[in-house]
Amino acid sequence: MARETVRGKLIAVEGLDGSGKSTQVHLLHTWLSGLGCKVFFSEWNSSEMVKGATTRGKKKQLLTPTTFSLIHATDFADRYERQILPALKGGYVVLCDRYIFTSFARDAVRGCDPAWLRRLYGFALMPDMVFYFRLPLDVAMSRIIDGRPNLKYFEAGMDMGLSSDAQESFQIFQERVMNEYDRIAEEFGLSVIDGTLGIRVQQELVRERIEHAIDLSRYRARVVR
Amino acid sequence: MTPKRCFGNPPAGVRLGQLAGHLLVIEGADSSGRSTQVNLLSEWLERSGYAVAQVGLKRSKLVTPELDDAKKGNILSPRTMSLFYATDFYDQLENRIVPALRAGYIVIADRYIYTLMARDLVRGAEQQWLDSLYSMALVPDMVFFLQTSIRNQIERKLSLQYRLDYWESGMDLGLSPDWFDSYVRYQRKLQAVFLRLHELYKFELLNGNRSVAAIQHDLRARVGTMLSALSEEPIL
């Protein structure tokens, strides 16, 4: 992992689809802004530069595990170098909805070499805190399947040939991703939050842990917007 | 038939066992006359009855439009350029090179990972990071490096395209505000890196400061020798 001294703080959230991490990061964002902190938010797979390639690759099912991984790494590198790192150097609290651990988990399940993945993302700074929203598989499954009856091809891991039934494939795929996340949580010491708790209870825990680890008064904006 | 291998582990899901064809790589600077040689070699091989597939950089369907767009703006950092090209490379490796080799084709690559590495190294990439990035590439059966003087490169470039190219002149590196000057400096740096890579990978050096016909003659002789050694069926 890259070593560099930056003024800002980097906080990431990770977890399966449906784990509630996006809700939590949104609440966190609101709270930090309310405290007067300079906050910057960045989301996985959101760079304009590679969007077309990702969409085309997914639609036409052109992607292999390796190119799937590399295209997400390109997206990440673009956001990292143009947004995340400059914001950190500028003294922001940077919130990331998914970070390199998403690739470590998903791409490893698709068969990419875990050591290769860690070297690929070797340029990225280790966050100051990473929250892993952990949910029992059946709960995560029902949350997603209830909300979205038509699963997308790659989302369901259909490219892996696990099952011709999207729902079944999704279940097997997500289970493997979860096992991988559990290993990663141990390897990198991620801060685990029980995703079955109520939304407010989870948010309390997140805020407590952040206040304990980070002196937020240092990240107040000097220029009031 | 020599078994194929990758520099490190193969890409996920790629089995190397049954690759019957051969992978030839021709490396060389911009405007070194490389593509002309590739085309002539390819014609000759087909006349001799070999099935030939050509690949090159930035020819994948997956990322080429985005890469072209990005190269037009000012948003491409060395790292994202590197990763874009790596995506393009593996797309072609898995979807074109490997299937063609499996079908027994001779695949001629007009540039390969060495050019990609050289460009990135000149821009400050770490060798270790690149080694890992391209560790899943197939080791070619033969790599030719067409060596041309920078003076010859410039003459070719100007006589064919009448202008210097931003990226080929390394203008992103800020070596000099003068395009000609920057081109010369950038290409010199690339040459130096290629010589370092040659120490590591032992290319077949090909003197590019000769006539097209003389280079081709030399190239065919060497490819012919290699193919008869590899396939045990004499060529021609």
Image (cartoon, coloured by chain):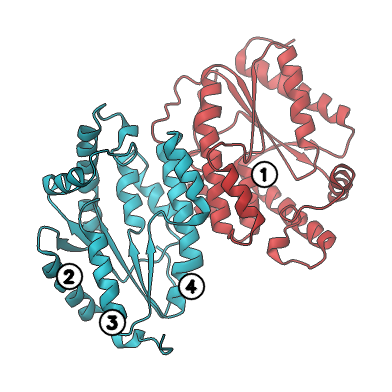
Chain colours: A cyan, B red
Q: Please name whichever residue, B100 or A140, is drawn nearer the observer in this view of the structure.
A: A140
Amino acid under label 4? Pro
Say which label, 2 or 3, has the lower sequence index: 3
Which residue position holds label 1?
B198
Q: Position of residue B176 (x, y in %)?
A: 78, 67
Q: Position of residue A143 (x, y in %)?
A: 16, 48
Same chain, marks 2 and 3? yes
Left or right for A159, reference A205: right
For residue A177, which quarter of the picture? top left
Which residue position holds label 3?
A34
Which residue position holds label 2?
A203
Q: Chain of mark 4?
A: A
The CA distance from mark 4 to mark 1 is 37 Å
Same chain, marks 2 and 4? yes
Question: Would residue A189 be seen by someone viewing this image from the given angle?
Answer: no
The CA distance from mark 2 to mark 3 is 15 Å
Q: Chain of mark 1?
A: B
| Quadrant assignment for the C terminus of chain A | bottom left
Crowding at mark 3 (Cα within 10 Å: few <14, some 14-19, many 20+) = few
